[in-house]
Image: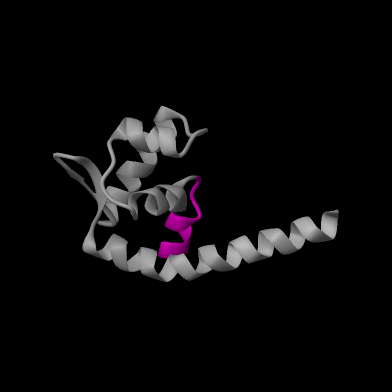
Amino acid sequence: MAAFDLLGRRWAMGIIWNLSSGPATFRGLQAACETISPSILNRRLKDLREARLVERTLDGYQLTESGSALFRHLHPLGDWAIGWARLVADEEE
């Protein structure tokens, strides 16, 4: 349940998703997440670092080995979400 609590926090999964393609600076993450405020990004990075899913490096932030393993489990959920969003959009038309 602790993992679901962490991942359910605003922008937690978005940060993990964006870091899945490689390291990013704070500003790079902020740009990738578009509407995230600096204070939320800072707090979420702290949460994810404490959970050992993200680490700070000379290149900015990157997923740890555990964070990468988590992303491999989340990726199929992303595929499902894209199909689900299309289904919902088709039904609304």
Tell me: residue 7, above or below residue 73.
Answer: above
Specify start and end residues of the magenta stretch as a single range: 1-10
> Magenta span: helix, strand or loop, mainly?
helix
Q: x and y percent of residue 82 in the render?
A: 60, 61
- Residue 1 seen in render: no
The residue sitting at 25% across, 44% down in the picture is 61
| Residue 66 falls inside the magenta stretch | no
| Residue 6 falls inside the magenta stretch | yes
The residue sitting at 34% across, 47% down in the picture is 47
Colour pattern: one colour
Q: x and y percent of residue 57 in the render?
A: 16, 43
Q: x and y percent of residue 46 in the render?
A: 31, 43
Task: Give the farthest residue toward the right.
Answer: 93
The residue sitting at 68% across, 59% down in the picture is 85
The residue sitting at 31% across, 68% down in the picture is 69
Q: How many discs appear?
A: 0
Q: x and y percent of residue 3 in the render?
A: 41, 63
Q: Is residue 81 left or right of residue 30?
A: right
Q: Is residue 65 left or right of residue 43?
A: left
- Residue 44 seen in render: yes
Tell me: residue 16, above or below residue 3.
Answer: above
Image quadrant assignment for residue 90: bottom right
Tell me: residue 88, above or below residue 48.
Answer: below
Q: Nearer the viewer, residue 41 or 86?
A: 86
